Image: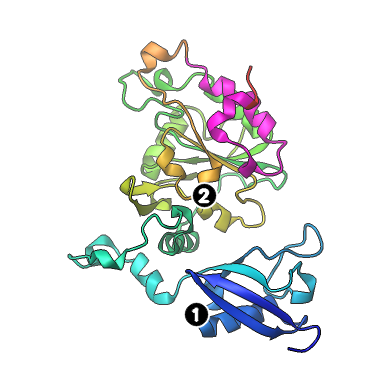
């Protein structure tokens, strides 16, 4: 290999693919084309993890050339991507799947973290492409992302009352008004859009004059995953929103608040489990969960990387 030539190793699905003799003028797109020949993963389905531009704050795109990247000698880069055949399998409806599943077809369940498994990432890609988001207020570039569940997080949906306000979690509007100062707010419920819209209108959330909601996401934006611990469940992958707004949001500036921890499976570093709000008539005078979260959100808004925060210990970072 001549002087000045670059060699990199691509890791994908436990295998390593060495690319030798690359020139500094070789683009990321050219690298992807070589990987397509070696792995059968189409260029548009590839994601190369760990590429960093020499100029801080500059994004790496397909046109970026290797000489502009911070590449160590014999650098190893992780590739994420799925061949078309596997994507088609992941997108099949349950009724299309065979009745008998050979256990040997899934030998690596839970060997790889759930959020890195190719078949689940393929489902996220499909949601990004196909799920239609009705935007009420365009997201603001200078704000981070806050995604909120409804049932047992903002509202007691099981108790009986004459109107929804009796079942609304205390300090809801104060919480949303404070959050709006630093966050783009998205409401994501594992229910249908009609129910979400009706409930948010009844509680005065959708068109509140003191804060703005970017959008509602419903159950159709969720994906089904299978894990050894939980079995087959639905979860809320923040990757759907990241895919819709790649220039605004990522794991570094996004938070999902939910009463169910399993909803964080595809975004494990970005989930905060809130205490469920139930039996509203008994607890509405003592529940201060949303009030206590306000100073934490203010603290979090000043952090550059949310993945460095232990959300299980959120109360220890800031309390009122």
Magenta span main SS = helix
Residue 215 visible at all? no
234 in relation to 45, above or below: above
Count every numbered label the image shows and give the total: 2
22 left or right, relative to 122 = right
Question: Residue at the spot x=43%, y=32% of the render?
Answer: 259
* Quarter that holds the C terminus: top right
The residue beneath circle 1 is 39
Question: Residue at the spot x=36%, y=65% of the render?
Answer: 90
The picture places residue 218, in percent across and down from the top left corner, at: 42, 46
The residue beneath circle 2 is 238
Which region is colored magenta?
287-316
User: As drawn, which residue projects farthest toward the bottom?
Assistant: 2
The picture places residue 162, in percent across and down from the top left corner, at: 33, 18
Q: Nearer the viewer, mark 2 or mark 1?
A: 1
User: As drawn, which residue projects farthest toward the left?
Assistant: 99
The picture places residue 62, in percent across and down from the top left corner, at: 67, 74
Mark 2, secondary structure of its residue: loop
Residue density around tag 1, few if under 14, some if 14–19, many if 20 or more, within 10 Å: some
Question: Residue at the spot x=46%, y=59% of the render?
Answer: 124
């Amino acid at each position: 290999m001549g002087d000045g030539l670059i060699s990199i190793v691509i890791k994908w699905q436990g295998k390593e693919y060495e690319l030798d003799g690359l020139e500094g003028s070789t683009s990321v797109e050219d690298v992807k084309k070589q990987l397509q020949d070696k792995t059968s993963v189409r260029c548009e389905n590839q994601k190369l993890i760990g590429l960093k531009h020499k100029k801080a704050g500059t994004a790496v795109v397909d046109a970026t050339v290797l000489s502009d990247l911070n590449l160590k000698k014999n650098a190893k880069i992780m590739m994420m991507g799925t061949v078309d055949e596997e994507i088609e399998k992941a997108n099949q409806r349950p009724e299309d799947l065979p009745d008998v599943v050979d256990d040997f077809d899934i030998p690596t369940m839970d060997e790889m973290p759930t959020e890195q498994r190719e078949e689940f990432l393929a489902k996220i890609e499909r949601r990004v492409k196909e799920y239609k988001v009705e935007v009420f207020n365009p997201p603001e570039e200078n704000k981070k992302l806050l995604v909120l569940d409804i049932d047992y997080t903002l509202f007691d949906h099981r108790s009986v009352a004459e109107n929804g306000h009796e079942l609304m979690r205390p300090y809801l509007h104060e919480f949303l008004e404070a959050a709006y100062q630093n966050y783009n707010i998205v409401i994501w419920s594992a229910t249908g859009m009609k129910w979400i819209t009706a409930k948010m209108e009844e509680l005065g959330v959708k068109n509140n004059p003191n804060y703005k909601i970017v959008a509602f996401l419903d159950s159709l934006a969720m994906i089904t995953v299978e894990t050894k611990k939980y079995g087959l469940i639905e979860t809320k992958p923040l990757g759907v929103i990241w895919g819709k707004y790649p220039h605004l949001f990522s794991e570094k500036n996004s938070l999902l608040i939910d009463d169910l921890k399993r909803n964080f499976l595809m975004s494990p570093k970005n989930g905060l489990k809130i205490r469920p709000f139930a039996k509203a008539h008994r607890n509405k005078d003592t529940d201060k969960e949303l009030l206590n979260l306000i100073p934490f959100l203010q603290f979090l808004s000043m952090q550059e990387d949310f993945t460095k925060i232990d959300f299980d210990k959120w109360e220890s970072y800031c309390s009122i």
